[in-house]
Amino acid sequence: MHLKLDQAPWQSAAKGVDAAGHHQPVGYWHETVSITPGAPLADQLDCDVAIVGGGFTGLSTAYHLKLHKPELEIALVEAGVVGHGASGRNGGFVMPLLGWDLLYAVDKLGDKTAGDAYRVMYDAVSYVKQTVAEHQLDCDLEATGYLLLNACGAREKRGRREYEAAHRLGFEHQWLEGDALNAYINSDQFTSGVFDPHPCVINPAKLARAMKELIASLGVRVYEQSPLLELTDGQPAVLRTPEGELHARQVMLAVNGYGEALGFLKSRILPVHTFIVLTEPLTAAQLDAVGWSEKRASLESARNFIHYFRLTADNRILFGGEDAKLYYQGRYFDADDAVFDALKERFRAYFPALRDVAFTHQWGGVLGISLDMFPSFGATGDHNNLFYAGGYSGHGVALSNYAGAIIAPLILRAGGETNVDTPPNTPFFVGHKPFWLGFEPFRYLGVQAYRALLRAQDSIQGA
């Protein structure tokens, strides 16, 4: 296998580090942390494992490899700075969703496989909470639970089926309507909801930067400002950056939606974009007006083009979704004014009492989405020494932070370690390969047609 970076998709997005060597924040989360870009890889280095990507997946893999075998030489290279990409821009929802939702997973996989996979996802949520507590990681973690809101009869019927499936599989979902629903959120746009008490929210940029410091303290070499320009498969694999080179026995490609520009899993994991707007801090009276002052649950609307919304630590409302865009030839964008305007309009429809609230931030970023909406973990390459995890399809905060617990034992066993147990309850998506969606322009046109169908369904249902 040979990978080479295509610079063209990046021309439409801001670089993580400017010409003067300063980090360029994208969105609110980056403004809550102090980021001084680390030094780039500037030499030839031999290592046991090279990790490409300074997001949650790469950080988690480095952490778990060091836990299993502290003497490993591990080098992580990141194009910008750790947490500049999707792991530092997302909504910060730590939840167990897999596929479109639990009901989708049950329909596609059956009760047993879906139930087993969802238990792994709940393990991932618990793992984030435990790791943050164990290492005292400053990331504004708040145990909020997660409420999926229904806005029409068709969605309510589906919500009932999901609630019943959850109980059949032994999960603790709750059905809310009337006063029980209004105790969580007060909006005449929603008639009912399904509440899961286990999810939490975090500040993702803070968590990414804290994890960088943690793995560095364990001896992982972290090189920022070091985009992977070329990877040549071999024994060892050779990874070339602008100023240096890594020779590694094994490689972890923790690139998710950014793999498109490398040609890795091209047209299998798509760089689809989501966008977010953020309000000014709300007063207690404003939160009371929408019934969000006591139960600070994270929320999502049940529709194809979802809306996800939550409170930040300083009582801003983060409101995202409305659309999911694949740009032609896989280009990357940090902003889309049409989506920002639509989000603000939708926000005011959901919360007319807050129609005069000001928006202070807006930003976007890349998701790695597969056609079936399921993630993929595995190994590839001519020597089966290139590992990957991605395709989280918009629900990756919990699983990407847990990814190392799943993939690190596989890396170690492939490297000759015999006393490493494979992960318990290995989920179906280990070894699962996403469907291929073809070449441009057919891929782009196909995705646009699919988006139109999903939007028409939302419109017909009134969701």
Image: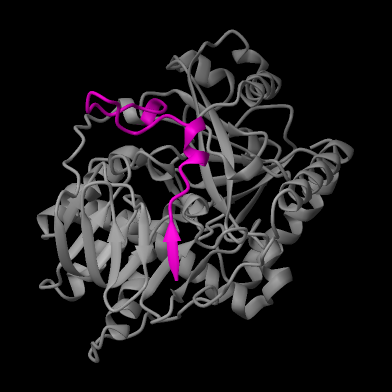
| In the image: residue 216, left or right of residue 106 | left
Asked if residue 9 lies in the magenta stretch, the reply is yes
Query: Residue 55 appears at what percent x and percent y?
Result: 35, 50
> For residue 44, which quarter of the picture?
bottom left
| In the image: residue 112, left or right of residue 214 | right
Q: Residue at x 48, y 33 (%)?
A: 11
Q: Say which quadrant the C terminus sits in.
A: top right
- The residue lying toward the viewer, choosing from 410 and 9, is 9
Q: Residue furthest right?
A: 460
Asked if residue 28 lies in the magenta stretch, the reply is yes
Q: Measured along the vertical axis of the image, is residue 451 above or below residue 45?
A: above
Q: Measured along the vertical axis of the image, is residue 382 above or below residue 106?
A: below
Q: Residue at x 69, y 77 (%)?
A: 110
Q: Which region shows up in magenta? A: 1-29
> For residue 118, which quarter of the picture?
bottom right
Q: Residue at x 52, y 78 (%)?
A: 431
Query: Residue 353 appears at what percent x and percent y?
Result: 63, 14
Q: Say which quadrant the N terminus sits in.
A: bottom left
Query: Residue 154 appears at what percent x and percent y?
Result: 84, 47
| In the image: residue 399, left or right of residue 429 | left
Q: Residue at x 39, y 59 (%)?
A: 254
